[in-house]
Structures are given as structure tokens and as C-alpha cells.
Image: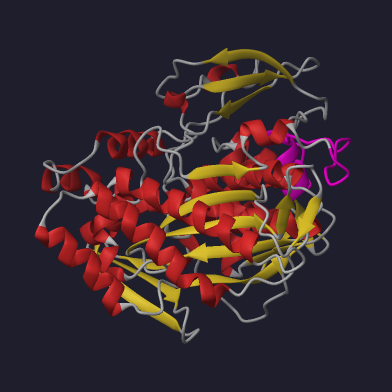
Amino acid sequence: MSLKTKAKKSVTITITIALILFTYNTWEDYKVKYRDSLRQVVIENVERLRLCRKPQNGYLIFECPECGARKYVPFTCKSRICTSCGTKSANEWADKIHHRLLRVPYKHVVFTIPDTLWELFRNPNHQKILFLASKVTMEEMIRFSNKRSKKKVKLKIGMIQVLQTYGADMKYDPHIHSIVTEGGFESKKNWIHVDFIKYEGWRKKWQYELLTRLKKELPRSTETNTFIDRHFKNYPKGFVVYGKRRFEKREGWNMARYIGRYVKHPPIAESRITRYDGKQVTFWYEDTKTKQRITVTMDKFEFVHRLLSHVPEKNFKVVRYIGLYSRRGYKHRQTEFSDEEAVLIIRSWRDEIKRIFQYDPLLCPKCNTEMELVEICYCGTESYPVNDLYPGKPPPEESFLSQQEKVQLVVSLIIENRNGRGANIEKVVSEAEKRGMGGGEVLSDIERLKFEGYAYQHKNGEICYVY
């Protein structure tokens, strides 16, 4: 991040989804207002978010073998609306997808539907039609785009589908994102490459496959026939299919990460939320057609309703693996196109912190010795047993700091511990922990400061506050 020289007098706090839900009694009032339509899966995800990285959710206990100092690492919530957990899950999913991709060219294809059908596809049974219709359409597109063969040979393609139910403004807008191989294997296991697909010509195929399957799911009546016929007549060119973006395996992680954010990430990035006063929420989004930034202000209950409406039903699969990437297809991929010797690296929370912050969270702040796991607490308590943090010494004074006070404490520690241009992150974390803050909280607050432009980080692991 480049250094900003403009003076700033106050610290801006990132407005989080948890902050909106659990302040001003928003979540409790929302449950009363929407008690007749509130789904159990939504309640579970919100309550899990409330306990994310809290002592009540359980924690790991690490202890220094030299001096006996202890460190408590809380469990995360894995909630669908938790940005922190969603980011980690999306990264892990991208790693797995990139590892599985064949060494062939790919297309990023998006199957969309008109807004007159959006509400109808809130039904999970109807959402399955989106997956099936897009699968059949894509298989036919690949098959009949093969100009090298006069006889149209059925090819086994590889396709990874992800259902996204929202647009940039969080309105309900179901569509399918997919990663598709440019070609496939014929019956003799020979790879047939298809280098050109005219997507505009397949819009009507997508329309036909979707509407005919939808018609079978809807009640048989004159109204249903009229409704389906109207969508054929009003869209003579078919439904829109985007497929211009082409990429290779080496770019697969970035594409998988782009699509993976829809898997477990909330429908809005917290960085786009600019204001919350207890009654209204303000956020911005970029219009896909004009590329202009549009600011929206809405009632907090409407915001929460939009947010929670995109939580899928339990056990509903928002990701589908087709053809070469299905379970059976994956077993038969012993070809020169696969990276059989590649090893999938699974990073632990410790590895992620070391990679991003250049800071080892399991080095003892007192004697720099690697801490060891000594206990796992699943039940959790109201607070960490701070009396055991430093055996033989008085415990640090308990502090019940607000979010604003915590960030101000981190800022003061950065300024106090400056050595040259910046302060060592490990030193700042250590000092903050002595004052009752968790190491994870400190790192999170540092990231907020960096994002807002109040701090920047050197490559050597130092953080400098800009004031």
C-alpha cells in the first residue's frame, strides 16, 4: 500500500455485518418482524456468527514449554455470512479446484435468466433446473462447435457449476457461473479441442432447455402454458449466455477464487458498506453496464433481509461437478493432461497468518520459543481463563474495550513501539495481548487500518501509522 501523506484526525472503523446485526438490537427486532418467514438455517448461521472467535465457541490452548506462557486461539464460526470465514473457505476451495483442473484451455461461462423469472427460482427444486439445463446446453455447445469432425461425436467435457443468487446490489438474481473445458474426450479417450464457440447462437438452446424443464415442474394449467409461451415470445433471441473469457490452467486459481467467493462468502463485501447509523445502511456497488459506482441507502431491516435471503438451505449443493470433474469422471483422468504428481498444499491458520502478516502467532512473546498445543476446549466459557496466561505473575488487568477503543489501542502501540519508520507487528501483538486483546483481534484491526489508508506495512513485517 502506498504511503498517504494527508493528515487524518480520527480512526475509521470498518462497518461489519456483525456490527449491523448485533448492535441497536437489530437481530432481535428482525426475528420478531419476520418471525413467520424466518428459516431455521438463517437463525443458525446468524447465531454462529455471533460466537465467531469468541470464548463461548471453544478454543485451542497453546503453552510455551520454556516459560509456561499460554495463548488461546478461538474457533471460527464457518457461517455463510461471515466475511472472515468466507474468505478462508473461498481460498481453500480455489486451491482444490486449481489442483484438479486439467492442463487444457477453459472458458468462464455465465448462464442468465430474465428478471421475470427471478422470484420463481427461489424454490430450491427449481434451482436444480438451472444446473441441469446449463449442463445439457453446454454439452451440446461443445459437441456441435467441433468443426474438425463431420460426424458430431459426443464428448465428455469437464464443467464446474456454481449457483449465484444475487447481483451487485444484493437483489435476488439467480444465475450459473461455470468453468468449462474447451473440448472433451471422445469414447477412445482422445482429446478433441474446440477452439471456437459462438455463444450467441446457443441462447435459444439455453432458453429451450430451461423453460421446457420448468414447465414440467409447474402445475399443469392454462396459466402455466401462457406463462411459458410468453417467455418464448418476449425473448425471440433466447436468454443471455456470456462466454468470452478464456483462460489456461495456470490462471485457474484466480478464476476459481473469483467464482469461489459465491460459494460461502456473504453477498456483499464489508469494504462496500460505508455508513450505518442504527437505522439505515449505506453501501455502494458498480453497475455492470455503465461501470459507474452507485450508492444505495436503505432501512437496516431491508438490508438484513436481502443479506439473509441468499443463505441456501442446509445440504443444498451450490456447486456441481460435471463430466470429467464428477466423482466417476475423476477416476478415469489418467492422461497426459492431468498433473498427477502435483501436491495439494493445505495451509493451516498458522501458515496463513505467517504468509499474510509475516508473523508467527505461535512464537512465545516472552522467550521466542515455539508454543505447543496442550488442550482443546470444546464447551467454551464466557471468557478465557486469563489467570493462567502468565503463571506466577499477576494477570493483566481485564479490559472490556469497545471496537473503537481497541483500534485506538493498536494505533497507540504502533506509535509507541516505532523503531525507525515502523513498529514490529510481533511486538505490537505482544503488547496488545498483555492488555487483554487477542492476537487475532490485533491483526484484524491492523488490516482495517491498512484498508482505510491509516497504516501501511513494509515487507520486513513492520507496520507504520499515517497521521
Res. 305 in view: no
Residue 155 is situated, as x and y percent measured from the top left of the image, at 67, 51
Q: Is residue 339 magenta?
A: yes
Of 165 and 179, which appears nearest the observer? 179
**Magenta stretch?**
335-360
Where is 50 relative to 196, above or below? above
Residue 381 is situated, as x and y percent measured from the top left of the image, at 42, 19
Where is 170 relative to 72, above or below? below
Res. 434 in view: yes
| Rendered-image quadrant of the C terminus | bottom right
Seen at 39% across and 46% down, the residue is 128
Seen at 81% across and 57% down, the residue is 250
Judged from this view, the residue extending furthest toward the front is: 151
Residue 273: quadrant of the picture: bottom left
Of 231 and 55, which appears nearest the observer? 231
Residue 255 is situated, as x and y percent measured from the top left of the image, at 66, 59
